[in-house]
Amino acid sequence: MANLIEQLLNGLTLGSIYALVALGYTMVYGILLMINFAHSEIFMAGAFLGWAALIITRSLPGPWGILIAFVVGMLGCGILAVGIEKAAYAPLRRAPRLAPLISAIGVSIILQNAVFLWRNDFLAFPLVFPQVQIPVGSVQLSLIQLVILGTSVSLMILLWLFVNKTRLGQAMRACSQDREAAELVGIPVDRIISMTFFIGAVLGGAAGILFSLYYGSIKYNMGFVPGMKAFTAAVLGGIGNVPGAMLGGVLLGSAEAMGTAFLPESDWKDVFAFGILILILIFRPRGILGEKTADKV
Amino acid sequence: MKLLETKNLGMSFGGLEALCNLNMAVEAGEIESLIGPNGAGKTTFFNLLTGIYKPSMGKIIFSGERIDLDTPYRITQRGVARTFQNIRLFNNMTVLENVMVGRHCRTKSELFSAIFRTPQFYREESEIIHSARERLKFVGLLGAGNEIAGNLAYGDQRKLEIARALATEPRLLLLDEPTAGMTQGESLELGKLIQRISKEGVTILLIEHRMSLVMKLSQRVHVLDHGVKIAEGTPGEIQSNPKVVEAYLGVGGETQDIRELGHA
Amino acid sequence: MRRSLFFLQKQWPIFLVILAAILIPLFLQKTSYSYLIRILGLTGLYMIMALGLNIVVGFIGLLDLGFMAFYAIGAYSMALLSRAGVGFWWSLPACVLITMIFRLVIGAPVLRLRGDYLAIVTLGFGEITRIILNNWDSLTNGPKGLSLLTSDAVKPVRLAHWTLSTNTDFYYLILFFVILCVLVSSRLENSRVGRAWVAIRENEVAARLLGINLTRLKMVGFVASAAFAGMAGGIFARWENFVTPESFTFWESVMLVTMVVIGGMGSIPGVLLGAAIVALVPEALRNILGSEFVSWRTLIFGVALVLVAVFRPQGIWPNKRLSRELHLEEDARGST
């Protein structure tokens, strides 16, 4: 029984990371109806930026190193994402739907390979947190897991507050629902779009650092599989739906943790996630919390 | 003979009831019109007829057979064709190619004959090109065969869409606001085309706002408002029907005859 | 007869190219560049696959990111059949058939999906295929791969009294199939089926309402494209005499899409050019800049993809129809 709860907590930990990345996918899809293929590389960029920051701030005492790493990683990713949006996606807003997808794939290739050419193998991520176990109820949680859960939940709460309680958040929701109408009422849609990318990337970058803290190493292609899983989570919860992404992340993480208990082969774990994605897209493409949209004829 | 019939047809989108309890029929060989203010549910009705939407309730019967559960391509194969309010041409294919695609549902060549260029393939291609040209001639676009469809003048684009629909050999042709955006002259020309199509034996159901055209062409007019049929009858009966005038202008309007509405 | 003569008159550059293609290896063999023959052969295989993918991406307009999986299925089918003692000329059609069946089964639930979702799902299936090939050790020998040299049952590839074994032999075999595939693609393009595919790409709703069974036609396109991949995979397996899952990754699928996009979606000469560029650029890099730059090729293709998507979406050698489609969008963009 304790083992089950432990697995569940593992799942929640991983799931919260997926949720952070899923939010990036879902917010961009909500506004632009586009799957940002390059988002998984933003996740990876966060990890590498965080790594660089940790190396530089090695000598700083206490939590300063890791805090700076988070700031650098998150801000860096945000700026990177806005740059990508302006260069590779904005010109294609009115192009046929294949064009932005192809551009996104291109960006993804560029980012991955830029890192690959610099370092084509695993890179150890500094162990910032002591490997202690903290008893919570009847189970043991590692400090890292607590940090991850705490950080992601806080970030998600902040996002929720932003989207629902601020004017900018309201503008974002308006653009999501009907971009043309939003433009007509004076909302600066271009800036809102950039902001959406920025926020999604900030969360994704944070997720990248959390992921690296958990697993201890980073690699140029680390974004591919978590990115796919996060996208699955976003679709599971309802693509375009912010609470849906959070829900989807948590569900997927838990399901995967349960699955690993029974399927030891790590490769099959990925098949499991892909399988879920395919099943959802075929049988319930709007996900759990998404709405049905009718085609306009 | 009733070519098309609907029984208690209803369509809801979430909470919105777009069509309610619609009972109507179209006689074979006639030109009939469907009119009503914007938002009355006319295009929704066409979408139901062509299988794009599945009705929330009721039935649609075409030539004695129920079609409301059929897929769009099956319905077209049965003999129902339509044009669109916002023109939907294959803009980057030539005019001729657009009409050739219309012949798709009446021809059979598959992969095998295409790859091996069998005699059947050549026979069919020849037939497709020939009948496509015939349709273009019928609507008056034969000279433009090699033009890119997207480059045609607006009025010609509408004619092309009709030619393409005719290529499917429909028994019932649904025209969704074919004269929208046309000048008076262009719409009179289109009216003549519609009459010629009718003489070929095709039954026509027309959504239109140009009352002059509706009254001149139709043998029967159906009026929708807010998803409900409020009147049906000959043009004469509809013109002076107070409910119809009210639907268009609201209560207390000075006009008593909807011919005074001109075109919307 | 008159039709054929007219064809010959108009299309003489094609015959020139074919002639050059036939003569090149004979020259290369005499020089120190004979290793290029192998690369040209691989280019030919890429061309066959690009032609196949062109049906789905170019004609119909759907993004398929898992196409490599069918190359893999073709290759593994050939490997398994050959090791079971089946001769090449029997196995090759079998590979094509097997690949088409897989595509039929995998494609059926997926065809109704929207463009972006379809892209992800095809990606997913591609990955699943690779993972299965990598892990089903009893059938595929997992990551260690299957070798055709270690089994005595494998029969050599024979054509009349020739045995095909050298790179040059396979080059000519591949050249033959490339020409065949170009012919088939071209015939498909100019047929009722081809027009219906383009109609689907141009305006799906209108196509549906003209009596085109979207699901069926998309499936036909999918299955036809898989045939190309299966054939290429089968030839590759016998040429290399070795198959391993590592040759069939997601990145290879992306490379195939790159070929089609850069060359020109829907354009037969375009995708051939695209295949040649993607296959030969690494060589060019190696010779001009040095072998350490070969790994830059993927980066270069990423940049090329973005540049093409933004500035020249119709590709280098466009299909005239698509070129118009994308220019209309450019005009709309430019006028705001």
Image (cartoon, coloured by chain):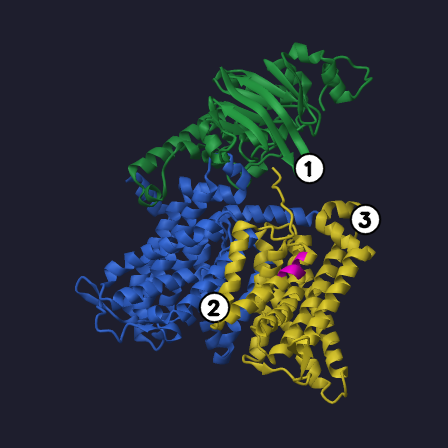
Chain colours: A yellow, B green, C blue
Q: Are marks 3 and 2 on the same chain?
A: yes
Asked if A245 appears above or below B100 in the picture, the reply is below
- Label 3, secondary structure: give it: loop
Confirm or deny contact between disc 1 and disc 3 (CB under 8 A). Answer: no
Disc 1 to disc 2, C-alpha distance? 44 Å
- Mark linked to residue A186: 3
Q: Is residue A12 above or below residue B233?
A: below
User: Which image quadrant is residue A87 in?
Assistant: bottom right
User: Same subunit under labels 1 and 2?
Assistant: no
Q: Amino acid at mark 1?
A: Gly
Disc 2 target residue: A268
Mark 1 touching mark 2, by CB under 8 A?
A: no
* Pair 3/2: label in front: 2
* Crowding at mark 2 (Cα within 10 Å: few <14, some 14-19, many 20+): some
Assign a secondary structure to mark 1: loop
Range drawn in magenta: A244-248
Q: Secondary structure at mark 2?
A: helix
Label 1 sits on residue: B15
- Position of residue B253 relative to residue A141, above or below, is above
Quadrant, the C terminus of chain A = top right
Location of residue B224 with respect to C256 vertically, above or below? above
Give the chain of mark 3. A
Residue at point 57%, 77% (across, down): A219
Q: Main secondary structure of the magenta part?
A: helix
Position of residue B220 measured from the top left corner of the image (x, y, whole percent): 60, 14
- Magenta-span inclusion, residue B168: no
Q: Residue visible at 53% across and 66% down?
A: C301
Image position of A142 (left or right of A259): right
Tell me the subunit letter for badge 2: A
Q: Amino acid at mark 2?
A: Trp
